[in-house]
Image (spheres, grey):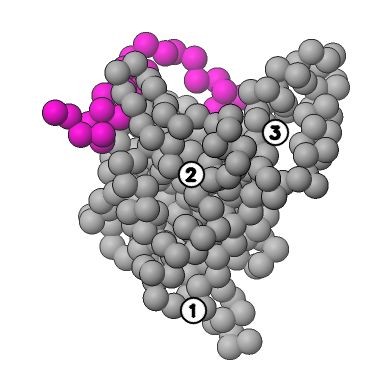
Amino acid sequence: MKSGVDLQRAAMAEICSTRDDWSFHVTSDPLTRFLRDRRMQTALRMLRVRGLLDPAKQSVLIVCGGVGGEGVFLRRYGFTDITVSDLSEEALAVCRGLEPRLRTMSLNAENMADIPDSSYDLVLVQDGLHHLPRPVLGFTEMLRVARRAVIVIEPHEGLVGKLIGTEWERHGDVVNYVFRWNRSILDQATRSYLLCKQTIVLPRRMWDHNVVVGKLARRFPERWRLPVAKVVYQVLRPVNRLGNMMVAVVVKPGGNPAHRSGR
C-alpha cells in the first residue's frame, strides 16, 4: 500500500506530464495577479507593519511549493534568496523553467531533517499543509527551520467550511483530507513546540473565493475587472471573521526587533 506522500508525489508527476500551460503562475494580468497574490500580500503586510520584513536581505523557504507560483510572486516582490521545496521533482523542474533564479529542493515537509534549525529567515506555505498526512508535524518542522517567522495560509475551520467547503480532495486515484486550522489549533501547536511565552501568533481570517470572483469580474469590460474584484472583497471585509481562509504569521522568540532591543 502506498503512503499518502507517495500518492501525492505520483499525482503531481502525472499533472506535470499532461499539462503544458502554467501561465497562471507567471502572468502579469492585473486581475489574475490580484486574485492569486492577495493572501500573500496580506501576510507580508502583517510582517512589514511590525518591522519584520526586509526582502533584499531575508532568505525564504517555501514548503509544498509545487511549480513555484509563490516563488515567482516573492521574486517580483523583491526577495532574492528564495528556495522552493516540494515532494515532486517534476514540479520543481517546471518551477526552474518558469523562474530560473529560484533555488529548488526536493523535500518532504513532514521531515526536513537535512535542514538545520533556524536556517531560513522566513518559512512559508500556501495551500500545502492540508495535503500532508500529518499537517501539524509539517507546521512544527517549519517552526524549527525558521529563524524569524513562519507564514501559514491554509483553509480555516468554521461553519462556512463545514457547510460548503471541500472535506475530501480527489485527484484521480489520490485522495487527501482537507485539514482546517483555527486560532486555537495554531496557537497550541506553536506554543507546545516552542515552549516560549514570547512567541507572537497572529492568525487572520479572510474570504477567498477567487474562482467565483474571477468569473464574476470577467463578465465586465477589461478595464473594470480588477476594480470589480476589489469591490467584492471590500464588501466582504466587515465579515472577514467568518471567512473560509486563515492567513497567519508566527514570529519566533528573538525574531521581533522589539524583543532584541529589550523594549
**SS type, badge 2:** loop
Residue 82 makes an appearance in the image = no
**SS type, badge 3:** helix
Magenta stretch?
1-29
Residue at the (43%, 36%) spot, across then down: 178
Q: Which residue is mark 2?
A: 180
Query: Magenta stretch: residue 26 in it?
Result: yes
Which residue type does callout 1 highlight? Lys
Q: Residues within 10 Å of mark 3 (few under 14, many from 20)?
A: some
Circles 2 and 3, Cβ within 8 Å, touching? The answer is: no
Pick out the residue farthest to the bottom: 262
Image quarter of residue 160: top right
Circle nearer the N terminus (1, 2): 2
The percent position of residue 28, horizontal first and vertical second, equals 66, 26
Depth check: 157 or 247 in front?
157
User: For the residues marked 2 and 3, what is the alpha-carbon distance in whole angstroms?
Assistant: 24 Å
The percent position of residue 51, horizontal first and vertical second, equals 65, 67
| Dominant secondary-structure state across the stretch colored magenta | helix
Q: Which dot marks residue 34? A: 3
Q: Which dot marks residue 17? A: none
